[in-house]
Amino acid sequence: MKILAIYFRSGSGISVIYERIFCELAKHATVDVLSDMAHSTESMPIRNTYSLPMSRFTQSLYRKCLRNFGKAPISEWWSRKAMRVVANDYDLVIAFVASSQLTPIVSGKLIAEKLGCKFAIYSVDAIPAPGGWTKPREYRGKLKIVSKYFASADYVASSNKHMLDFQLSTFKHKQGLRSNVLLTPSPNEEYHFPVSNEELILYTGSLYGLRNPNYLFGAFKRLLKTYPNARLQLVGMKHRLRQMDDILSVEERERVIISPHTSNLAPLFERARVLIDIDADREKDPFLSSKIITYLKTNRMILCETGKDTPSREMFHGYKTIIQCDHNEDSFYEGLMRAMELSQSEQDYSEREPLIKAFSIDVVCSIFWEDIKALCNVSE
């Protein structure tokens, strides 16, 4: 069984997820990798790697064509170059794709058609991102690309059921199309700390787009009346948000710490009492933030602000150590107070073990491999 895995932005956060998946698949099959950036594969069980860089000017031209015309001539040009260098004996081409770069699905379609092999797509994003995440013109442009190239896929996977349902609604299905949910695999690290002596509330990642920080700041302002020594730390930002000045007083803003991105979260998790997750400020949003997947393996209370009919609402309902709240200040405040109260003593974090197992790389890739065998009619 020979597989060609195509992905872009080697070294980015999303690409690390994809690398873990195709390295796991390499335990069962011969895997080659095609990417836009050269990277070390010494520790990867990969047969061949092909890298075809795309300059900044070319990337800019790609985005303009996509946004203004809903076409991907740059992706097709890159794909034709790729077809001249990759092997010609694959049983399956897998496009690992994110909303930021659609070239892998263009290349995957063209290479699979040339070789007459199966074509699979796995995305951690809903493409195009619905509900205001994407500007209207860019949304229409991406939708044209998706409707054209996803239509050639023999298999489509997304990282949760809500996202998969949305994705399957964006294109005309090829006869016999297979699809499935492949959860985003969690990092290997687990964090087990004693109860923190600090009253630290931690949010990791950026707050942008439809992630509304107003309810967080409003709830924190009210929390300070009960926990005057509490601190809120936002990790992954370069400057404070405008909403801080609008909602918090000068004295209250002194209780907020703004920190740049760091890959070493362990010291922050150790000091924290509560870990905050914020979904898009809308109902039925299909995204599940990657941060909460990391939070699950940390013995800290989690407060998840989410809308109705979302992946978070469905997956984490009923867990005592994962408190859910609505998109409003009162609900956020009540959830935060409850999380702070429970964080003062040891909790039964073992209740998360079924979730942690479901997000493990072993389980995710076991599902993927079984799907691949069925797709390609391979017994083993």
Image (cartoon, rainbow, N blue to C red):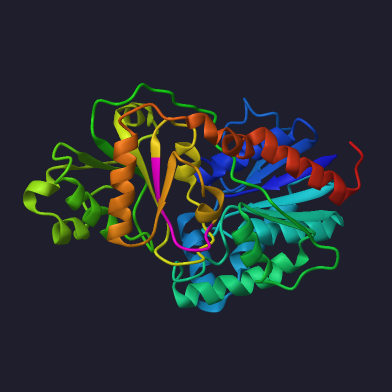
Taking depth in this image into account, of 378 and 45 the one nearest to the observer is: 378
* 330 magenta-colored: no
Q: Is residue 281 left or right of residue 97?
A: left
The residue depicted at 81 percent of the width and 62 percent of the height is: 177
Tell me which corner region of the image, top left, top right, bottom left or bottom right, holds residue 105: bottom right
Which quarter of the rendered picture does the N terminus lie within? top right
Q: Which residues are magenta?
A: 302-310
Which picture quadrant has residue 295? Answer: top left
Depth check, front residue: 84 or 359: 359
**In the visual, does 362 lie left or right of 245?**
right
As rendered, which of 105 and 347 lies closer to the eye?
Answer: 347
Left or right, 63 with reference to 209: right
Q: Position of residue 2 (x, y in %)?
A: 82, 41
Tag count in the figure? 0
Judge whether 12 appears above or below 41 on screen: below
Indicate the position of residue 183 as horizontal and vertical percent values. Answer: 62, 46
Of all residues, the one furthest to the left in this rendering is 251
Q: Is residue 163 visible?
A: yes
Observer-nearest residue: 321 or 125? 321
Residue depicted at x 50% and y 42%: 319
Residue 131, above or below 248: below
Q: Quadrant of the C terminus?
A: top right
Task: Estimate the x, y position of residue 330 in percent, counting from the top left.
Answer: 28, 59
Residue at 28% across / 45% down in the picture? 337
Quarter of the rendering containing residue 201? top left
Q: Position of residue 102 (x, y in %)?
A: 59, 60
- Report whether 131 appears left or right of 90: left
* Camera sees residue 12: no
